[in-house]
Amino acid sequence: MASRKIYWNILCAGLTACFSFCMQMGFGQSLQTITDKKDILIGEQIRLTIKLPLPLNSAGLNKWLVIPDSIAHFEIVETGKTDTINFKDNSKAIEQTITITSFDSGRWVFPALPVEFSENDPQGPAGGQPARIVMTDSFFVNVSYSPADTTNQLRDIKPIIKVTVTDYSWYYIAGGVILLLLIVYLLYRYFKKKPELKPAVNNSGLSSFDEAMKELKKLSQYNLQDAAGIKMYHTKLSAIFKNYLGRRQQKDLLGKTTGDLLISMKEIDLPAENISNIANALRCNDAVKFAKYLPLTNESDACLQKIKDTINLLHTSKP
């Protein structure tokens, strides 16, 4: 009985080992190592894809590709994510893409990488299947420089670019001429002598005194009942005095202000009282004309009388 039991154990162990070896061989044959190129220039990248189909109703893997920290003559550029691909027949496949490159010229062997399988079996024990390690296929990679140019032709680093040169000289010349003409014009206006004011032209045929008295007599009969009439009264009163004084001094004083008139009268030797009276009359006229001041009738008559007295005084004085 003991010998039969020993033989039975040996037979089970052998069957288990054989089964494991067959499974490992099956995984090794189905593991695919795919490269997009094997001849590259220095620094050019290679996409290495590792793909493993899984049996039907497989729950997946606990462990996958083991990538070393460094590989001689090669650099790991990027390690892609592990993707699970589902097919219509309920089968699956595990796939991962690794990007590698090399900066050493020559013919190098990219080594086989260990793939550790530890599959989850939903119908098996809680610990799952034991781990199995299968190696990917190794492959040669030719790393070379770009082919040398044997034509011996000199080439520019960059192609010659045609540049259109715009001549702005005429713009500068035209701008300078315009600026010069503007300066000349401004200097001409600045140094140009102002034309002398021409004396008021007498079209009535009367002397300045007679004309002033005639106009003052007409104005004394003017109606002062409304604001428009009062404004017209005082406006004509100032014009009569300016016209008389302008004809006397042979100047055009119609556009002058009250201050200008008083400065012109400094040339005439008049008493201070008369200068004050004519100043008050002219300022009253300005207040009515510009400030809408409405004086009483006796104030308007007083302004007319002061201007009339000043004209009489100027008439009797020396010109």
Image (cartoon, grey):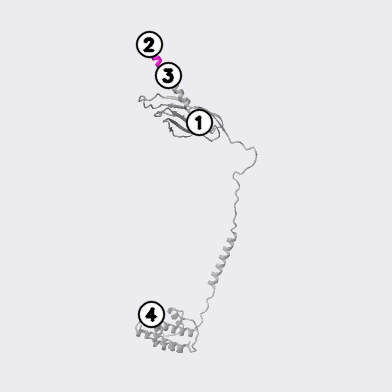
| Position above or below: 98 against 317 | above
Residue that badge 1 annotates = 34
Q: Residues within 10 Å of mark 3 (few under 14, many from 20)?
A: few
Q: Nearer the viewer, residue 151 or 6?
A: 6
The quarter of the picture where residue 155 lies is: top right
Q: Earlier in the sequence, mark 2 or mark 4?
A: 2
Residue that badge 3 annotates = 17
Q: Earlier in the sequence, mark 3 or mark 1?
A: 3
Task: Give the total of numbered labels.
Answer: 4
Q: Amino acid at mark 4?
A: Val
Q: Amino acid at mark 1?
A: Ile
Give the spatial CA distance, label 3 vs label 2. Answer: 20 Å
Q: Nearer the viewer, residue 260 or 244?
A: 244
Q: Secondary structure at mark 2?
A: helix
Q: Nearer the viewer, residue 99 or 34?
A: 34
Residue 231 in the image: state x and y as whole percent. 39, 81
Residue at position x 42%, y 17% in the image? 15
Give the spatial CA distance, label 2 vs label 1. Answer: 50 Å
Residue that badge 4 annotates = 288
